[in-house]
Amino acid sequence: MSILVLTSDTLIGTPASGNLEYNGQFFGTDSNASRAQFQRIARATAVASTSGTSIDFTNIPAWVEKITVIFQGVSTNSTSNHLIQLGAGSVTSSGYTSLGLRLVNAASPSSASSTAGFILGDIASASAAIAGHMVITNISGNIWVASGYGSYGSGGFINGGSISLSGTLDRVRLTTVNGTDTFDAGSVNIIYEG
């Protein structure tokens, strides 16, 4: 059995064929010493969404290019719509382009928009237990786009949006439009990828 040992966290120049390196990322090399980056996937620790007005995931590494926010049975004590906000050093609460649709039946969806975050949908029900995903992807520089889908009670929702941050993303927040409704059920987590 072979064992791989990483002995340094700095690059070693042009690596020999077959080397792996670590400097916040993993790389492989071919016989021409060309570097190819391996994608990294990490999952944070799930947080119970049973108290508080917001749930934060911080210290997201600078190499992250894609974040998936996962909801399981998330609800609040009132009717303000749910928001996902991003941040670079602090949470960004303006400048978003975001639209969410509530789907009770395909013939009559209702919509909600927000410039304060990525809105999940026009859900607005204290009894709506949300299950689903929102995928947030870096398109270039500090510009991020989002799309999501899921269910709540007997309905569903879809959403999308974009934001240009002032710096490198390092945090994700789940909150509500009014910022005062309290979470009272479920859990939320993120998966992030390089």
Image (cartoon, rainbow, N blue to C red):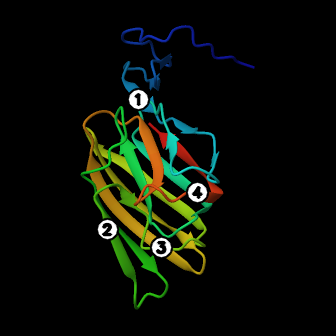
User: For the residues marked 3 and 1, what is the alpha-carbon distance in whole angstroms?
Assistant: 43 Å
Is residue 189 shown above or below 59?
A: below
Question: Which dot, 3 or 4, sits closer to the camera?
Answer: 4
Disc with the residue nearer the chain's start (3 vs 4): 3
Q: Name the residue under label 2.
A: 113
Residue 138 placement: quadrant: top left
Callout 2: few (<14), some (14-19), or many (20+) C-alpha neighbours within 10 Å? many
Residue 117, label in figure:
none
- The structure residue drawn at horizontal position 51% and vertical position 76%, both measured from the top left corner, is 156
Question: Element at badge 4?
Answer: strand
Q: Mark 4 points at which residue?
A: 183
Callout 1: few (<14), some (14-19), or many (20+) C-alpha neighbours within 10 Å? few
User: For the residues marked 4 and 2, what is the alpha-carbon distance in whole angstroms?
Assistant: 21 Å
Residue 124 is situated, as x and y percent measured from the top left of the image, at 47, 73
Report the side of 165 relative to 22 (left or right).
left
Disc with the residue nearer the chain's start (1 vs 2): 1
Residue 36, label in figure:
1
Disc with the residue nearer the chain's start (2 vs 3): 2
Residue type at mark 1 is Ala
Residue type at mark 3 is Ile
- The structure residue drawn at horizontal position 75% and vertical position 20%, both measured from the top left corner, is 1
Residue 26 is situated, as x and y percent measured from the top left of the image, at 48, 25
Question: Element at badge 2?
Answer: strand
Callout 3: few (<14), some (14-19), or many (20+) C-alpha neighbours within 10 Å? many
Residue 137 is situated, as x and y percent measured from the top left of the image, at 37, 48
